[in-house]
Amino acid sequence: MVQEISAPWHSRAICLQGLGNGNTKGHRRLLKLCQGDWGFIFAGQVMYAAKANCPTRRYRHADMTLLFLLALLPASLPAAGPDHLPEDLTSMSLEDLMDIEVTSVSKKPQKRSEAAAAIFVISNDDLRHWGVTSVPDALRRVPGVQVARIDANKWAISARGFNSRFANKLLVLIDGRSVYTPLFAGVYWESHDVPLEDIERIEVIRGPGGTLWGANAVNGVINIITRHAGDTQGTLVTAGAGDVERGFGSVRYGSQLENGTNYRVYAKHSSHAEGGNSIGAHDDWELGQVGFRSDWERNARDSFTLQGDYYEGKAGEQVEVASGMVNNPPATFTDDTELSGGNLLFRWQRKVRANSSFTLQAYFDHIKRDEIVLYEDRDILDLDFQHHLNPASDHDILWGIGYRHIRDATQNNATFSLDPSTRDVDLFSAFIQDEISLAPNLRLVLGSKFEHNDFTGIEIQPNARISWLMEDGHTLWGAVSRAVRTPARGEHDVILRLLPPPAQDPGVPLFAMGNALFESENLTAYELGYRINRGKWWSLDLTVFYNEYDELRTLDPAGMPPADILLPFDNRMEGETHGIELAAQWEVQPGWDVHASYSYLDTFLHLVNGSNDSAAESGEESAPRHQAAVWSSFELGRNFEFDVALRSVDDISINGVEVDGYTELDLRLGWIARTGMEISLTGQNLLDSQHTEFLPDFIATQPTDVERSIHVKGIWKF
């Protein structure tokens, strides 16, 4: 009987009622051509792509011919650059983009083209040209990153597989401040609405970053870096509205005090409509945020940063939960999740001497969530010190120590409870890394992170990387790394009542239960990368990887089933992933750039030690095997800009339910009316009226579709 009830019931607590069986999965490895005539209609300030005679079934894969034609579409238009572009809106050349300094790979500035890691950089100018209104939408074009929207305010975002709303192998930072929640693991993306105009760049590392960033930087690191206050002087006003983006806007003011301190203050508000669902989902949401940043130098050796943010908002949700009686239909609750939080960060950088410097950073973060199933009130205090020195000409050493204290308070209910309901957790860490110059163009990096947490004790995460900087802009690099994903508080202490699909209801209550013996998930990763940088004309970045996982999370019954079936978290699954990631860019001519990205991912999971958790094993289908995107930016003349992007995402399966792949088109037309004034019109997801991207897990919220949308945005700087 244990085997009969253990497999798919917990199903990550998703309610499948009303979703049907889904469409039959097509051939994953074939590109399906959609027959029909295409007409491109340029009406006023938008290029609209309309399908004339296409079958009603949603087509899953990109037509390669269409990709090519869209990339070449602007070729017949005159090439002329906008006049009097504001300094902070000018496009960087491809050569500059490859030589841009990044810090997330080694915690020190280095050229992107020389980094021994799979890194993709989204610049401030990219965010403007792409017409996106949120960071998750911007991440859709990054190779190796899986981005899917569950409903209007919830996202599933991961790197190199294992996608979920609570994707727990991707570390996300904002200016070095971790926004990875330690309660369930993962990121609440709806709570982090960073003003896009204040972002300097987004550095996305695919692959382990545990040696420098610690536990949970398993499959990748996303570091959102905001601009120095000295680069945001004056007044900036943004405003926009559309059918899905009901309204958004921000005001920012920056100046300098008499003592040379640069500062800025800002306020932002956004409101979003419900997602597509015939029965309604009550998933509209809005968020307001205020904040500041100041940067100053006391002398030539010391520089300081002080910044902070506070936000409040609400995010609607409709949740189905198991009722108190066995075999009763689930109860449906509709309400608004109340979101609020704030943070304060201080950073001191000191140059001790020519070959030695240190950085001291401290931040405090407060988060409060009050939703139907979960209440969380959490405080985090984080202290971090790192020292950079060059004791010899062929050694570049970075070492540091850190401490983090987490205190949370929760409120228990019949569906969700933690024991204890309030807990303090401490994390101690230290790391050291040495970059050794074996030859003028050959570098070896060796290092390790050492951490102690309250759940599993000491964790060690070593790392070895080598890079060969060849002539003519060629770089070859390789890496072998170990990373761990430490237990979340919920995996240790939770009791969560699950909602099985009706056809597999065992007739007794099911509970996911925390396990004090739950161990860290482990990864050993092997990576090989190759870059070509042909100056300002074109570049190519290729990465291949192979990952081995063990001690992966499962849920299995605890002994013979009593009246209530308890499914404690355990570590009875292993797996492997391998894949290819490609990013390319080409400057066809001045004022016209073409970019492309592609990723291939294969995931294989295996239950071990007698586990029957087929739902956990089905996680190998939660990320698309193929993803591709091509986008082009073109200056039309007379201060007009035209941007086009085509994205294709392969099929996935969530707990046995098929979700079709999709192909979507985004278009943007921008007009720089005068210096400091820009107006743009953006259409997103234009090829389908709506499409499903993902389904919820663990908490059975009502999913909704991503709809075709259009919005207008204005930027004024003075």
Image: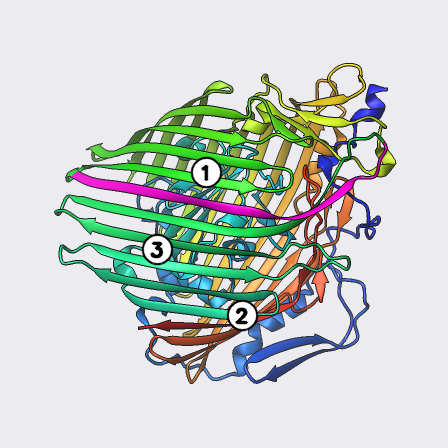
Q: Is residue 359 above or below residue 90?
A: above
State whether residue 450 appears in this view: no
Mark 1–mark 2 Cα distance, whole angstroms, equals 46 Å
For the N terminus, give its image quadrant.
top right
x and y percentages locating residue 644 in the rendered image: 56, 70
x and y percentages locating residue 656 in the rendered image: 78, 41
Question: Which residue matches tag 2?
Answer: 241
Query: Which callout, 2 or 3, points at the residue further toward the start of the chain?
Result: 3
Instruction: Answer few, some or many: residues within 10 Å of disc 3's Cα (few below 14, many 20 plus, some between 14 and 19).
Output: some
Kind of residue at badge 3: Asp
The stretch in magenta equals 327-351
* 264 displayed left or right of 568: left
x and y percentages locating residue 564 in the rendered image: 78, 21
Question: Which residue matches tag 3?
Answer: 99
Residue at 37% of width from left, 42% of height from top? 176
Question: Which residue matches tag 1?
Answer: 478
Q: Is residue 667 above or below residue 269?
A: below
State whether residue 432 appears in this view: yes
